[in-house]
Amino acid sequence: MTRDSKDRSASWFMEHHGGALLRLVHLSGIVHWQAAQNVLGFPKQMPDGLLDVTFAGKKKPDPFLIEIEAYPDQETLRQIRRDLAMVLLTRNVIPDMIVFVLLPKGKLSIDPEQITASAHGLTELQWKIRVVNLWTLSAEELLATGDIGLVPWAPLAHYDGPPGQLLEECRQRIETDAGPDERENLLAVTQVMAAQRYNDVELLRLLGEPAMSLEKALLKLPASKRVVAKLEKEAERRGEQKAEQKASQKYILSLLEARFGSVPKGLTRQLRAIEDPKELDELFRCAATCAGLAAFQVALERS
């Protein structure tokens, strides 16, 4: 299952069952929710989900920004800042933000309270979010809620029994409780989420054959068409970035060869593993000014 599969599944889920995730942060008094109808700007960095949630006693809905991340990392924090800024700029309001992390990654974690400072420290922005680590939740408790929208997340939660037993129960719940018009799509989303944790094709087949119905459903929905288009643009952008990265690496190697002759294969492999544009810019300057390949090697290892 690719990252695009996860992103598209999350987009479909947010449009149809996004309100189920609000249960995981114990919100009460929800009268109505819906996926935001407006199209945010910055299409290349669209958030996973923006929900308009109406509470009892309030006339206007409140925006809830949902971000779904496979692992906790530094890119997650940058994405959170971008998402918050997008909603603030387009709606002139700060949304409540919930970040769902699917899988642990070593000792990394997302601090729910962050302070971002300007270059010279004259300005600071402090922000707080709610972080939900799926693996700390109980799969049994998710299934016990009776909310069909929480079933796709159960394979990522803690479960003491064999995974096959859990996936079988997820499939049975969906086949029994989901409406006929979305049963296949919920199974597809559950399969995509389970694939984030279990790298076992036969195990995933307990949820059905590799699902194509989700892709077909996405293409039929107006709002989802926009999501697909933005994901395609994002893929195109990543392709352009990859081409730029390769070009930068080639220029650096050409410069090193022009100055110092043959470049060791080990150094070449290390350089080609660098993808960050800023790091490549710094290495280009280093290649132009360093005293020799040994000095460049030191700079490369610091990147």
Image (cartoon, helix red, strand yellow):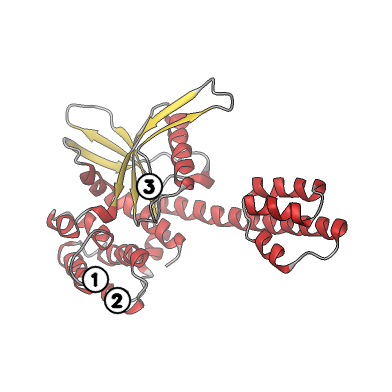
Q: Is 8 drawn above or below residue 57 in the view shown? A: below
The three-letter amino acid code for the residue at tag 3 is: Ser
Can you say which quadrant of the picture contains the N terminus? bottom left
Q: Secondary structure at mark 2?
A: helix
Q: Earlier in the sequence, mark 1 or mark 3?
A: 3
Mark 2 vs mark 1, CA separation in Å = 8 Å
List the residue tagged with mark 3: 109
Q: Contact (CB < 8 A) between labels 2 and 1?
A: yes
According to the image, label 1 marks what residue? 163
Q: Are marks 2 and 3 in contact (CB under 8 Å)?
A: no
In this view, the mark in front (2 or 1): 1
Most extreme residue toward the top is 122
Q: In the image, what residue type sits under mark 1?
A: Pro
Question: Could you tell me how far apart the alpha carbons at marks 2 and 3 are, in whole angstroms?
Answer: 29 Å
Residue furthest out toward the front:
294
Looking at the image, residue 238 sits to the left or right of residue 167; the answer is right
Question: Which residue corresponds to mark 2?
Answer: 203
Q: Residues within 10 Å of mark 1 (few under 14, many from 20)?
A: some
Task: Decide: few, some or many residues near mark 3? Use Cα within 10 Å; few <14, some 14-19, many ≥20.
Answer: some
Q: Is residue 222 left or right of residue 56?
A: right
228 relative to 233 in the view: left or right: left
- SS at badge 1: helix
Q: Quadrant of residue 205?
A: bottom left
Q: Give amino acid for label 2.
A: Leu
